[in-house]
Amino acid sequence: MNHYQKLYTPADSAIVFIDQQPQMLFGVANADRATLINNTTLLAKVAKEYNVPAVLTAVETESFSGYIWPQLLDVFPGQSVVERSSMNSWDDPGFRKAIEATGRKNIIMTGLWTEVCITWPTIEMLAPAIMFTSWRIAAARLRLRPRKPRFRAWFKPVRCG
């Protein structure tokens, strides 16, 4: 079987939560905010239940965006949060180090804003041949456009490298 067609497993995957912060939530236009928080929290609980390593990262916590949602922090008590000053999380050496420290090549991306939180680091991850997918029901858009539910798109891995 082609390496890129294998199913993700807890043994070869890690999950990333990018910018699930209160101030950033105000920019969400296409999803119910409570549902978005609940979906993200559920995804975090599933990852924890299956021992999938998680990376939490936030941008400008003190000066603008606020701390990561308490619901998410409650799932990972005591886990450090990678603090960044750049919107593109891959630009931050601490974020890259946290991803590499998981030892996993399949990265499940979830970020508050699809256009920024997921897209920018995903493009950067293409170079080192890391596999990724995004969890679309735990992400939102900055503009209002109806989302057509497509189950297979939520879990479609993308070939990198």
Image (cartoon, rainbow, N blue to C red):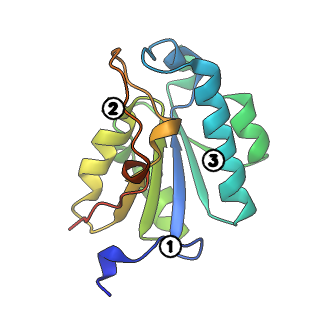
Under mark 2, the amino acid is Val
Which quarter of the picture shows residue 48?
Answer: bottom right
Distance of mark 1 from mark 3, alpha carbons?
20 Å
- Classify the position of the N terminus by image quarter: bottom left
According to the picture, the residue beneath numbered tag 1 turns out to be: 103
Mark earlier in primary sequence (1, 3)? 3
Mark earlier in primary sequence (2, 3)? 3
User: Which one is closest to the eye, mark 2 or mark 3?
Assistant: 3
In the structure shown, which secondary structural element does the residue marked by tag 3 occupy? helix
Under mark 3, the amino acid is Leu
According to the picture, the residue beneath numbered tag 2 turns out to be: 116
Residue at the image point whose x is 72% and y is 50% from the top: 45
According to the picture, the residue beneath numbered tag 3 turns out to be: 43
Question: Which one is in front, 128 or 92?
Answer: 128
Using the image, determine if residue 151 lies above or below residue 140: below
User: Is residue 68 in sight in this rendering?
Assistant: no
Q: Residue 18: x and y, percent?
A: 49, 39
In the structure shown, which secondary structural element does the residue marked by tag 1 occupy? loop
Q: Is there CB contact under 8 Å for labels 1 and 2?
A: no
User: Which one is closest to the eye, mark 1 or mark 3?
Assistant: 3
Distance of mark 2 from mark 3, alpha carbons?
20 Å
